Amino acid sequence: MEALLLVRSSQEKLFERYPLFYSYIGCVLLIEVVRFSWYKAQFDSYQTVYWYTELLTVLAGYGVIAEIYKRSLEHHPGVARRAQRVLLVVLVITLGEVAADTFRSPSGSWAHAIGIFGRDLRYVELLLWGVMLAVFSFYRIPAGRNLKALISGYGFYITMSVVNLAFVSQPGNRFWSIAAKLPSLAYLITLAIWCAGLWSRFPEPGPPAEDQIERDYRVLEMHTRRIFTRIKSFLKRFMRPGVTIEQFSRAQEAVDALIGEFSLGKRIFETGDMKYISRQPSLEARRVFLQERKALAISWLRHTRRQLAYLMDLHLKLASYTHHPNPRSDLSLWFEYRIFALVCDSLVAVVWIRGPFQLGTIVGHTLSAVNEFCAVFSLRLEDINAGLLSPAHRTNGA
């Protein structure tokens, strides 16, 4: 049946359309001939030849998944390029993990490693196939009859392979006799699906009028770049110490000032003053009071935000001067600070619209976060190892 598929691909010029798929079919056919000939001629070394040719089969099979992604997304070039890169990275990671485990194991053999690699790659292919179907369904990507046959046939084959690997062929299973025949039967059914769907070349659907998947991809790419830019900024600050004694002293003063202003922050947002003003007959007095208190609340929030930004930057710079550096904790704190900064900026807008007296719960959480940040900053300042500071820093701070 493989030979029949190859003949029809030549007659219908399908090889030009699906070169990786037909290369896989040709590879499987050639390997079957080599294995049969070797089995008859040199039975003793057949197992070695079997496993090395199995590696070629597995890699060629992964090419079918790459072909499916390439043809499915041919009208979406940005997504297609990213998908091809992801497929290559996944293949390299899977291959590297298996190779590393084999090298680490004193009794590891390459035959066993190829078997593990083939198993793991089947799991990966099934996952990639499922992701592709989900994308097809969500974005309603059209596919021609040839591509549908390619997708359904290979999807059936890898599904049955995974079922066989995960459930049926496990030692002690009562379906062991069935498991021995399942891969061959599944492959024959797959070939039948391919022969039916790829017997002739059918027209492919044109590009969609509205490319929603490309738009979503660009938005995702933009957000991803922003995230990596922020992480890069964090790493630069973390890896660039350059802190003087004077900056260290100012940091301690800033922490003390924030702690001292904590009660003022609570007082600004308390409703007691508003209740007192509400009992006054003058509407003008109420209006002026609300306007001034709103301005004071916004000013306090912005000042606190600036002070915390300064302390956060210095906190990261001081990481290499501590007795007990903890990069994971610093990264977690940085993410918490970014969330706090977003909440603080949003709170400024809410205070401007609604005033400072109807935000009790949000303000309470914000003040608690400020207090916790100050506690962390204080611990960092206490943990500083002054002996790690260079003479230049001590001279500049003198």
Image: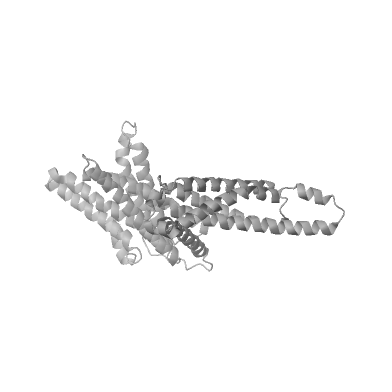
Q: Is residue 161 above or below residue 352?
A: above
Quarter of the rendering occupied by the C terminus: bottom left
Q: Residue at x 55, y 50 (%)?
A: 255
Q: Residue at x 31, y 58 (%)?
A: 5
**Which residue extends farthest front?**
398
Horizontal side, residue 177 vs residue 375: left or right = left
Residue 356 spot, x, y in % from top left:
71, 53
Residue 248 spot, x, y in % from top left:
48, 54
Residue 308 spot, x, y in % from top left:
55, 54
On the question of residue 195 being in view, the answer is: no
For the residue pair 119 and 282, the one nearer the viewer reads as 282
Horizontal side, residue 6 vs residue 229: left or right = left
Q: Is residue 236 above or below residue 107?
A: below
Would you identify the image quadrant in which residue 396 lies?
Answer: bottom left
Horizontal side, residue 376 vs residue 74: left or right = right
Residue 55 spot, x, y in % from top left:
25, 51
For the residue pair 158 and 314, the one nearer the viewer reads as 314
On the question of residue 270 being in view, the answer is: yes
Q: Residue at x 81, y 51 (%)?
A: 277
Judging from the image, the colouring scheme is one colour
For the residue pair 220 and 301, the one nearer the viewer reads as 301
Q: Residue at x 67, y 46 (%)?
A: 361
